[in-house]
Image (cartoon, rainbow, N blue to C red):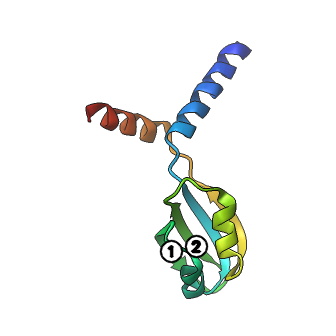
Amino acid sequence: MKYINLYILIDKSIFVKKYKLNIFEIKYKGDFKQVDATLGSQFKILDHAENKNENYLRVQHLDDGSNNQLLQAIIPAAEILSFEEIIPSMNDVFIKAVQEDKK
């Protein structure tokens, strides 16, 4: 039974790597305008929200660069509170695989 579970985990990790979205959710303290100005053309802001204590940002890395590149771009303009990569669900992977198969 342990071998089956290991195979399933390996199988899922292969799908996650193949269908990586390069989308990140970041909570930070700082001014959104400054953060926006520091992000280069390799990043696309998908969503943001501001409130009194912390701000939220959802960013897509358009190149296949590292997480460090995104952090290095934001750190001069803001204090990072949390940083999380969005991993696609198995449903998202299935839908994308079907769409690609139709092409």
- Indicate left or right for 62 with 73 as reference: left
Residue 83, position in %: x, y?
67, 62
Per the model, the C-alpha gap separating discs 2 and 1 is 5 Å
Q: Looking at the rendering, which quadrant does residue 50 occupy?
A: bottom right
Tell me the SS state at disc 2. Answer: strand
Residue 25, position in %: x, y?
59, 63
Tell me the SS state at disc 1. Answer: strand
Residue 20, position in %: x, y?
53, 45
The quarter of the rendered structure image containing the C terminus is top left
Q: Which mark is residue 48?
A: 1
Q: Looking at the rendering, which quadrant does residue 36 occupy?
A: bottom right
What's the residue type where badge 2 is placed? Tyr
Contact, CB < 8 Å: mark 2 with mark 1?
yes
* For residue 69, above or below residue 34: above
Q: Looking at the rendering, which quadrant does residue 79 occupy?
A: bottom right
Which residue lies at the image location 37% right of the left edge and 38% below the top edge? 95
